[in-house]
Each structure stands twice: as C-alpha cells, then as structure tokens.
Image: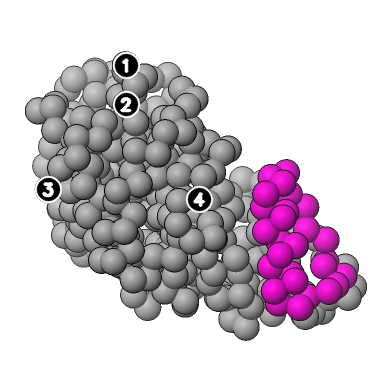
Amino acid sequence: MNLEKNKEYIVDIVDMGINGEGIAKIDNYPIFIKNAIKGEKVKILLIKKGTNFGVGKMLEIITHSKDRQAPFCSVYGKCGGCELQHIVYEKQLEYKKDMVKNNFRKFGLDENKIVGIIGMEKPYCYRNKAQYPFGISKSMQIVTGFYAQRSHNIIENDVCKIENEKSEAIVKSILDYVKENNISVYDEQKKNGYLRHVVIKVGVSTNEIMVVFVTNSNENILQGIIEPLINEFEDIKTIVQNVNTKNSNVIMGESNIILYGNGTIEDKLGQYTFKISPLSFYQVNPIQTKKLYDKAKEYIGSANVLFDLYCGIGTIGIYCSDIASKVYGIEIVSQAIDNARENARINNVKNI
C-alpha cells in the first residue's frame, strides 16, 4: 500500500513502543500512535511519514481494549510527565516487563531470567521530589505547573496525583506570595526575571521538608516568605536559594545560599538514615527503592568487595554494607561524596 501523509487509515495496534505509544503496521511499515493500546482497532490520521516509521494521530477508537481506563489527571495528554495513565496499572507492569524482554532479545541475553516487575500497592502520591517551573502564561499571568511534552510551555496544574501532597500545598502558597508581591519570574525568551523554579524535597519517613528557590540572581528577594512558610508548614526544616544564571535546560545551579535551617533534611531507608542536600540525588520513589535494594541484597547474598557506581549520597552502598567486607562508592559530584561520607558516619558504617 502506498501510504500518504495527512490521509486517514483504520489500523490494528499490534505492539507497544518504549514511550507508551501503540504500534500499528501497514505492509510491515510501523506507525506509532500516542494513547493507543495493543489489541485496539483505531482510526488515525498519518501526520508523519518517515523512511523507517510513521506517526499517526488517533481520531477514533473503533474497538476498545479491556485494559483502557480513564486517566486520573485532568491535564493528562498535555503535561509531559506521565505516558501510561490510560492503561490499567497491572497492564502497565506487563508492558514494562515486555520492554525489558525485548531489549534482552535485542542484545542476545536470556529473557527467561526476567521473572516479573514488582509494582506498588498504591501508585499515587509517591514522589518525594517535585520541580515546579515558574513562568508567564499567554494571558500574562504568573503560573506554575509542569512542562508540556517536548517543550518548555508550562501546563498549569493544581493537583498532581504522583507528587507528594505536601509539595502541592507548599507550591500553591509560594505562587500566591509571588503574585501578591509582584516578584518577577523567569522568561526563557527574554532571559530575564527572578524566580525560575521551586524544588521541594520530602523525607517520607521523617516528614522533613526542604524548599529550594532556584533564582536568576543571588539577590534575596524572597526573604519575606520564609516566616509565613515555616509557620504554615511546620515540617519545613530548611529553605535554600539555589542560584542559576545560565541559559540552559539544567534546573539547578552550583551555588546554594541557606535562608533557613541547616541546608539539609534527613530520610530513612530501612534501618539507615540519609542526609539530603539541594543538589544530591536521592531516589524519588522511596517505597520502591527499599524493595529494589532488598532485592539486590537478596541476589548478592554476600560479597567480599562491592562497587557502588554513580553512588550519589551513598544510599545503596550503605544499605548493602552489611553484606560486604568492603564497599567502594564512585561519583563525579564532589558535594554528593561529601554527603555520602557524612551518611556513612551517621550510620556508623566503617567498611565503605
């Protein structure tokens, strides 16, 4: 069949792509269709025709999959954060397992070693880190939310069902203050404005919260919000100003100014306590992190020497230190290594 761009076709979805797209094939030519599910028959508009694959826009679902569900987010499909909300959770896990199997086959590995994916009992409100960009809407209003897929256009959103609920309340309070006090926000086109992002980190086991203002200068324009914030949200243990003056997609800069508290919070994984700083990486899903680390320890059993590569603040190395004679953590970010050493000291781990 000679396919034509901007022409409608009725296709069967025979597979799923790595980004959650449905895949149809016409004469063995793959077409990727967002929000389609394997097993469905859909009407599409062919909006891109490349040499090796095409992209279709779904116009109508003719035969629905039993695994389709209504997305739980009001901006799903606009925000670039989630891609599988239209699929029931149990089926999401199956698709992810299939993706891993496909990669194993691709590289000649034994796919039978993949025993399954350990899902969450409640896959909502689990993220302990939230990053909110601030900007100006088309109606010239200060807004925050999340970036649209493959762009830096901010999709306004009051509620994100995968973020910690405390993060949402805090960022709403900050948005109100910024509006009421006419604090400028960053304009990516003009390269000016003060507030770029707000980053919130939550210690899920300790309830300790860190608020980070990412600003376009080292001026302290937000001093007036500190007392109201800590009075409204008693779990806020530290507030930090991170300075990022670079024209880049990187959210955080290298310079931190402590505005309140000591610049860190703590969280617990199992029996271990970890100190978290503004720039340090800490797994964003602590519930699944513990399951992951416990599974790793189960597979390892015991070891003479363990290497924790890209170790960050030392979480997995410290967590596995009780099954090894010696652990080496390797990391390029010097502040993270400082945190890792401090975390080893806090937990009295001396073999790392």
Provide residue 351's location: percent of width, then percent of height.
85, 72
**Distance Cα–Cα, label 1 vs label 2:** 8 Å
Gap between marks 2 and 4, in whole Å? 21 Å
Of all residues, the one furthest to the bottom in this rendering is 271
User: Is 11 contained in the magenta span?
Assistant: no
The residue at 78%/75% (across/down) is 349
Q: Residue at x 25, y 66 (%)?
A: 232
Q: Amino acid at mark 2?
A: Gly
The quadrant of the image that shows the C terminus is bottom right
User: Residue 288: which numbered mark, if any?
Assistant: none
Report how far apart the C-alphas of labels 1 and 4 lie in the structure: 28 Å
Is 346 contained in the magenta span? yes
Mark 3 to mark 1 CA distance (whole Å): 46 Å
Q: Which residue is mark 4?
A: 258
Q: Nearer the viewer, residue 108 or 136?
A: 136
Measured along the vertical axis of the image, is residue 94 above or below residue 24? below
Q: Is the residue 210 above or below the residue 28 in the image?
A: below
Above or below residue 275? Residue 297 is below
Hey, what amino acid is under mark 4?
Ile
At mark 2, the secondary structure is loop
Q: Which label sits on residue 190?
A: 1
Label 2 sits on residue: 193
> Are dots 3 and 1 in contact, CB under 8 Å?
no
